[in-house]
Image (cartoon, rainbow, N blue to C red):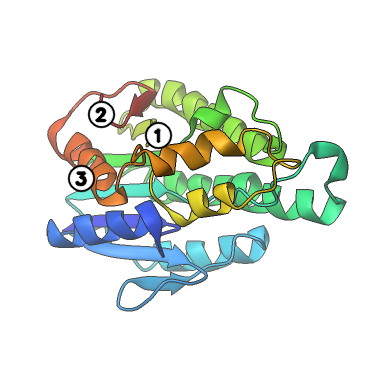
């Protein structure tokens, strides 16, 4: 059995990944607050400790001897609130970091622990972002979360080099896509996000990639390659 786990697969790229893997004959498990049957399992990363209990409980039900290939894709991230750092509330900062960092890393660690001794091909893929590598005004929380998670994945990539049954671990940058997140960005006030007109132009000029095309690229990357760098990008 080929088993795929998508964290944050209710819409956008996550939903496209669920569709692509299911059509490829994989057993798919999708975790999010708003996903739909038959793949969805409710998970709320705003509550990291509780989400870890839920996810760990699910992992314990998987029979290792039935797995031929295993992949987990971390696609859970929120970009809101879009606002300059001085105007963020502690509650907003806490909520964003719970989803983008704390809850996400808890899930990654649980996955690594559960399948450490599984000898078949196994993958841990984080959906990264260019925001991890530069600062966007109004995106301080999103930039911080993406940078933290990408750095975690890069360190795990190095750790896996010495493991007898290593995971293939990498960050994957999908670039700009036609998703709800982009809608949220375009609806920002210029006072909160001074670069908003650039992103509105991406949409107006047809520069946003369809999530389905990005999902197929990532699927083919996992299906065809045996060696990976710590970071790959859509189209590369």
In front: 78, or 201?
201
Q: Earlier in the sequence, mark 3 or mark 1?
A: 1
Mark 3 touching mark 2, by CB under 8 A? Answer: no
Mark 3 touching mark 1, by CB under 8 A? Answer: no
Residue at numbered disc 3 = 216
Percent of width and height locating residue 203: 42, 44
Label 1 crowding class (10 Å Cα cut-off): few <14, some 14-19, many 20+?
some
Residue at numbered disc 1 = 175
Above or below residue 188? Residue 31 is: below
Above or below residue 186? Residue 149 is: above
Tell me the distance, in whole angstroms, between the alpha carbons under discs 3 and 1. Answer: 14 Å
Residue located at (34% from left, 28% from top):
233
Above or below residue 12? Residue 225 is: above
Badge count: 3
In front: 62, or 37?
37
Label 2 crowding class (10 Å Cα cut-off): few <14, some 14-19, many 20+?
few
Percent of width and height locating residue 59: 41, 62
Question: SS for tag 1?
Answer: loop
Quadrant, the C terminus: top left
Q: Earlier in the sequence, mark 3 or mark 2?
A: 3
Residue at numbered disc 2 = 235
Label 3 crowding class (10 Å Cα cut-off): few <14, some 14-19, many 20+?
some
Quadrant, the N terminus: bottom left
Q: Is residue 77 left or right of residue 216?
A: right
Q: Nearer the viewer, mark 3 or mark 1?
A: 1
Tell me the distance, in whole angstroms, between the alpha carbons under discs 1 and 2. Answer: 9 Å
Question: SS for tag 2?
Answer: loop
Percent of width and height locating residue 131: 56, 31
Residue located at (43% from left, 37% from top):
202
Mark 1 touching mark 2, by CB under 8 A? Answer: yes
């Amino acid at each position: 059995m080929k088993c795929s786990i998508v964290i944050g697969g209710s819409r956008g790229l996550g939903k496209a990944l669920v569709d692509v893997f299911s059509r490829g004959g994989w057993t798919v498990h999708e975790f999010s607050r708003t996903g739909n049957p038959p793949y969805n399992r409710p998970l709320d990363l705003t509550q990291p400790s509780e989400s870890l209990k839920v996810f760990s409980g699910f992992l314990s039900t998987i029979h290792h001897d039935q797995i031929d290939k295993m992949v987990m894709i971390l696609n859970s991230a929120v970009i809101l609130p879009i606002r300059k750092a001085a105007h963020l509330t502690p509650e907003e900062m806490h909520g964003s970091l719970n989803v983008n960092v704390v809850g996400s890393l808890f899930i990654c660690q649980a996955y690594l622990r559960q399948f450490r001794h599984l000898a078949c091909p196994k993958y841990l893929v984080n959906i990264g972002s260019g925001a991890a590598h530069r600062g966007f005004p109004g995106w301080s929380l999103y930039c911080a979360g993406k940078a933290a998670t990408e750095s975690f994945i890069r360190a795990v990539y190095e750790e896996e080099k010495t493991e007898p049954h290593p995971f293939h671990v990498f960050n994957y940058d999908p670039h700009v896509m036609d998703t709800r997140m982009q809608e949220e960005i375009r609806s920002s006030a210029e006072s909160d996000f001074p670069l908003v007109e650039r992103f509105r132009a991406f949409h107006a000029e047809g520069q946003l990639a369809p999530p389905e095309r990005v999902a197929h690229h990532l699927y083919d990357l996992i299906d065809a390659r045996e060696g990976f760098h710590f970071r790959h990008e859509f189209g590369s």
